[in-house]
């Protein structure tokens, strides 16, 4: 193997974030070429395929591409969950049922006997069966949000992210069927090949970096016990190591540094200040490799 083939969404919700992830991994993709199906990069042995998201799982399964980024919704609809290597922490969305804004609706049973248009017939079928609702699933290939206006269906089941598409088409969300986010696909057969292993390690390091922050500060040495308790409460879940501290010569202070969860930053900052920490600096992290990540 002298090049990794990566399948990304050509346009749509995940396109920009997928390119950003590649860029954060040090792979510069010239977006001027995005109308092409295949793009080469000059700073990493990679070939990018820009595809319709629905085609990405098959490219991975058939080993035309080595790695792919796609919504979990697409993979589960195609029943190819075995290709999922890991979640990527972006592209959060939900597969939801929606109906025209002015339709009266009380409960899910109101969909009994109604026509529901979707490009996700398998996920929807499972969902309705679980709830004992018998509806007519109208399987269409795109522009699902137009179906009620075109009298093709009474309701739709489609991906909602910002909600803008539903809003523009005068539809209201009534129930969530499936929660999704971007996932990384890779053939198990290929994941140990050196170039792929190296790329997977970069992707994980970037992913860890996004949800963690580096914190450093000075604190009176006699306060270290309290400080350690605060930091361990805020630590990155993957971090097995304790905080690092060392005394500053000829002072009663120590210098402390650690990696903490991004979501815990401000609560931790406050608790540290209350316990005598000074000159607290929070740094963004560019890449973070952890032994068990
Ligand atoms: C989905 C869905 C809507 C849009 C909803 O498309 O079909 O078009 O996202 O997002 P919004 O709530 O932010 O308006 P997606 O990009 O997942 O792929 P698709 O075009 O292949 O359906
Ligand atoms: Zn699609």
Image (cartoon, grey):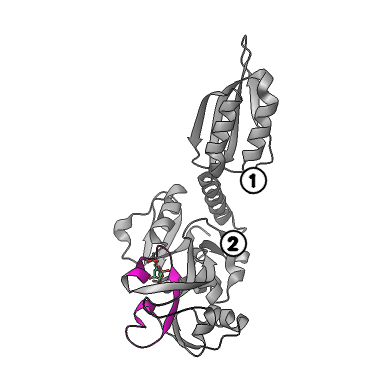
From the viewer's perspective, tell me whether residue 85 is left or right of residue 48: right
Residue 94 lies, with reference to residue 115, above or below; the image says: above
Q: Which residue is mark 1?
A: 237
Which quadrant of the view contains residue 218?
A: top right
Taking the magenta stretch, the answer to whether it contains residue 276 is no
**Picture coordinates of residue 292, whole percent (x, y):** 67, 47
User: Which residue appears farthest toward the top when viewing the image?
Assistant: 250
**Picture coordinates of residue 39, whole percent (x, y):** 37, 61
Please state which of residues 245 and 278 is positioned toward the viewer in this rendering.
278
**Picture coordinates of residue 89, whole percent (x, y):** 52, 55
- Nearer mark to the viewer, of 1 and 2: 1
Residue 63 visible? The answer is no
- In the picture, the disc for residue 85 is 2
Q: Residue at x 35, y 88 (%)?
A: 151
**Picture coordinates of residue 154, whole percent (x, y):** 41, 85
Q: Residue at x 62, y 44 (%)?
A: 290
Q: Choose the circle earlier in sequence order: 1 or 2.
A: 2
Q: Secondary structure at mark 2?
A: strand
Please provide the residue range marked out in magenta: 142-167
Is the residue marked by circle 2 packed among few (<14), some (14-19), or many (20+) residues within 10 Å? some
Please state which of residues 107 and 194 is positioned toward the viewer in this rendering.
107
Please state which of residues 33 and 77 is positioned toward the viewer in this rendering.
77
Residue 213 lies, with reference to residue 207, above or below; the image says: above
User: Which residue appears farthest toward the left when viewing the image?
Assistant: 32
Taking the magenta stretch, the answer to whether it contains residue 155 is yes
Q: Secondary structure at mark 1?
A: loop
Is the residue marked by circle 1 packed among few (<14), some (14-19), or many (20+) residues within 10 Å? few
Residue 197 lies, with reference to residue 279, above or below; the image says: below
How many marks overall? 2
Q: Assess mark 2: CB under 8 A from ligand 1?
A: no
């Amino acid at each position: 193997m002298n090049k990794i083939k990566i399948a990304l969404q050509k346009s749509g919700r995940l396109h920009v974030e997928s390119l950003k992830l590649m860029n954060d991994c040090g792979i510069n993709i010239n977006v001027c070429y995005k109308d092409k199906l295949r793009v080469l990069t000059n700073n990493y042995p990679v070939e990018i395929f820009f595809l319709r998201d629905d085609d990405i799982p098959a490219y991975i399964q058939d080993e035309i591409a080595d790695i792919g980024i796609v919504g979990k919704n697409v993979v589960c609809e195609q029943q190819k969950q075995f290709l999922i290597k890991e979640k990527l922490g972006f592209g959060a969305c939900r597969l939801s049922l929606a109906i025209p804004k002015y339709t009266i609706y009380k409960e899910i049973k109101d969909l009994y006997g109604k026509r529901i248009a979707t490009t996700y017939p398998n996920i929807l079928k499972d969902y309705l069966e679980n709830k004992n609702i018998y509806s007519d699933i109208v399987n269409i290939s795109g522009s699902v949000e137009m179906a009620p206006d075109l009298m093709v269906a009474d309701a739709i089941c489609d991906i909602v992210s910002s909600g803008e598409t539903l809003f523009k088409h005068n539809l209201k969300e009534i129930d969530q069927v499936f929660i999704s986010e971007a996932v990384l696909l890779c053939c198990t057969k290929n994941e140990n090949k050196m170039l792929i292993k190296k790329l997977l390690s970069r992707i994980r390091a970037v992913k860890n970096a996004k949800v963690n922050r580096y914190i450093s500060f000075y604190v009176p040495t006699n306060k270290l016990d309290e400080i350690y308790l605060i930091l361990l409460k805020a630590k990155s879940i993957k971090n097995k190591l304790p905080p690092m501290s060392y005394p500053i010569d000829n002072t009663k202070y120590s210098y402390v540094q650690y990696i903490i969860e991004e979501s815990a930053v401000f609560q931790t900052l406050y608790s540290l200040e209350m316990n005598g920490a000074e000159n607290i600096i929070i740094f963004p992290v560019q890449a973070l490799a952890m032994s068990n990540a």
